[in-house]
Image (spheres, grey):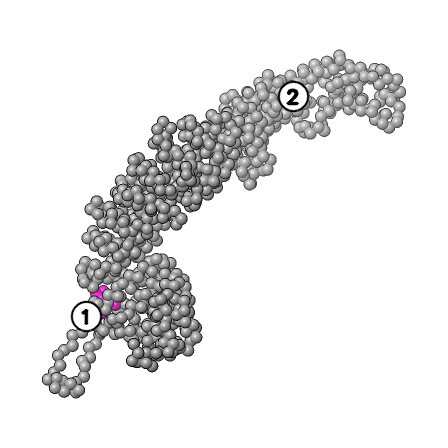
Amino acid sequence: MAGNGNLDGNSDNGGPPEDSYHFERLRIEPIYDSFICPLTKQVMRDPVSLENGQTFEREAIEKWFRECRESGRRVVCPMTLRELRSTELNPSIALRNTIEEWHARNEAAQLDMARRSLSVGCAENDTVQSLKFVQHLCLKNKSNKHVIRNAELMPMIVDVLRSSSRKVRCMALETLRFVVEDDSDNKEIMAEGDTVRTIVKFLSHEQSKEREEAVSLLYELSKSEKLCEKIGSINGAILIFVGMASSNSENLLTVEKAVQTLENLAQCENNVRQMAECGRLQPLLRLLLEGSQETKLSMAATLGGLVLNSDVKVFVAKSAGVSLINLMKSNDMKSREPALKALNQISSDEASAKVLIEAGILPPLVKDLFTVGTKQLTMQLKEVAATILANVVNSGHDFDLIPVGSDHQTLVSEEIIHNLLHLISNTGPSIECKLIQVLVGLTGSPSTVSSVVSAIRSSGATISLVQFIEAPQRDLRLASIKLLQNLAPHMGQELAGCLRGASGQLGSLIKVISENGGISEEQASAVGLLADLPERDAGLTRQLLEEGAFQMFISRIVRIRQGETRGSRFMTPYLEGLVKVLARVTFADLSGGGTALDLCRQHNLAALFIHLLQANGLDNVQMVSAMALENLSQESKNLTRLPEIPPAGFCAAIFPCLSKPPVISGLCKVHQGTCSLKETFCLLEGHAVDRLVALLDHNNEAVVEAALAALSTLLDDGVDVDEGVLALHDAEGIRPILDVLLEKRTDSLRRRAVWTVERLLRNPDIAIEVSSDPSISTALVDSFQHGDYITRQIAERALRHVDKIPNFSGIFPNIG
């Protein structure tokens, strides 16, 4: 009898290290010499005898025989070295049974010792050794897992997970993985109680060995469908796994295990739903495409309730758009509802909406909206369908090219628009809002707006659309205002006529614009609508004056410029709209006096518009302000008070040659009278010339043209042109005006520049200076050759000033 190293010869098989056999050394029975193989020096598992009675481990003696033959040696007994007549091996059944009984007795004792070492309060080292022994048993023989289960060690190992020692907890997780691997019965035991919840808690231990072991254990458990449901039912488990599966900082093996665990968990639909809510959509989409009809509907319903980011919506549209559209076309209402809700969710992104258009969503969608009778959608689903259509239309596609019905009808065909308008008039506010949003999208595109305008006119729906301005629902009111704003450039006179009516929509519009608080999209759209209506509509301007709207607009502009109004992303369009609406006062007839003139004087509008010229970065504000100043400056010559010349004295009456004209000081040189910025809107008195000249090098042609037009009023008929030229010269504006002519940016701007330059060239000094600049002459010649009729005439006069065209009227004064 002798002790011999390992009990079964597994020291080199990759199993647990030597100290895992702590319990092997604590046997109740010693190892008998007859149990030991002379070749391996280890306890035999399958003992066999030779003809001479020597006993060996079968595998070891077979290897000995093989080596003898391969080396060409005689086959001898490894113990006696005597040649054997036969290599037949006789199983030593009695010895094998004895060894197995010896193992069983020892293992029973060792298991009992392990149970005691796994009890609460045992030393850390003893607990670790017990766990290593359990691992050893699992590696030694798969059937030992049954022994461990019957010995009721598993609940004790689970209890060890609550140990204060990290080493013990980590070893316990690892041991449980050994115990449940490829053993469905042991997995069933793990499903009991709170064991799985306890294991899941270890997932929150960031970057630790415990976390890695917990992932590996849960991966093994997830191979059981019952445990898949259990794991998925634990709050946060799937979210953690999804996070780990997409982590860039996690151990690669841990990430791989997390991914594999999620694949296993996807056996349960509830888990698939949770994964989708956590952003992992592939399992849901796979079931949506490949599952049963019931499963497809369930997944579509889940998809409809998710909140997705833009990239994910595009991915879903590409992956499952066609499948959802097919479900939507089903005759079964139960199939259509989840499909519509899912499509509503993914259509709200511009890029995904375009994908759905290409997948063919428009024809069935339009059909659903317009179908009446037994197959019609409920009003709730019609609202969903209208929302999808609004989402799709606002993607900016060419809807005049996509057929949606019979006879190659498109969304902008007259019949389709009439049907939309009919629905708008015969449904509730929610659907009305979405359908109006459809029209907003169609009128926002240059390629489709004219067709929609034509259909609205032919249907006589203009008044009905205007009435929605008074809707109590903010969303509906906003949609209608945005639609009318899109229509205003094309139907301005009709809309102005409706607003001027007695029904009060103009007052409602003003009320929206004047709301206090932060500037909203509704306010910006409302003032934008007013701004786009014809500025020369005297009736609308008069009603705005009567409503006191302009005073409110002035107050809002001043507060914004002074920083008193809280900013928002709608600040710029709101301010631009206010300035443009206010500028319409300057288009009114001011020369005859009246309310408009009183308003301009009372609130010193000329000064306000001069101030707004400095609104850098707000091109439209600068442009409209310059246009308003042009209008006001045009009135200066009519509003200027001419001086009263005192009557001549007695001597002057008899001898006129001896008298001198009286000198009156303080008169405006350009307007030849008494001027002021507030009363007569004189640009010189308001020191506006320098600011207008500064805008002549603006990169926006519209701003340049408006500034040049305002400056041109100083050279117009009815004023002293020479003094106007002098004023421009003093403001260093001559060269910038000539540069505008040279740039030739637009036909309209060139026409304005040619007119202004011709007026400047009436000054002999400027004409002499310009005649030496060939570039100016070339620009005038080009305008003379290629401009319209009026531009050519003006260019011709300008060329005469610089002697580029002879003045025939001076040579032949009597001709004509």
- Would residue 170 be seen by someone viewing this image from the given angle? no
**Magenta span of residues:** 675-682
Residue, disc 2: 142
**Foreground residue, 806 or 422?**
806
Mark pair 1, 2: CA separation: 115 Å
- Mark 1 belongs to which amino acid? Arg
- Mark 2 belongs to which amino acid? Lys
Helix, strand or loop status at disc 1: loop
Give the answer, above or below, for where 326 lies relative to 609.
above
Disc 1, disc 2: CB below 8 Å? no
Give the answer, above or below, for where 83 lies relative to 322.
above
Q: Pinpoint residue 395: horizontal percent, then vertical percent.
A: 42, 44
Q: Pinpoint residue 272: horizontal percent, then vertical percent.
A: 49, 30
Badge 2: how crowded within 10 Å, few (<14), some, or many (20+)? some
- Would residue 471 be seen by someone viewing this image from the given angle? yes
- Is 608 left or right of 29, judged from the image as shown? left
**Foreground residue, 271 or 95?**
271
Q: Quadrant of the C terminus?
A: bottom left
Helix, strand or loop status at disc 2: loop
The quarter holding residue 179 reads: top right
Residue, disc 1: 641
User: Residue drawn 39% across and 66% down?
Assistant: 787
**Foreground residue, 790 or 729?**
790
User: Residue drawn 44% across and 29% down?
Assistant: 330
Q: Residue 389 magenta-drawn?
A: no
- Is 585 left or right of 126, judged from the image as shown? left
User: Residue drawn 73% across and 24% down?
Assistant: 9
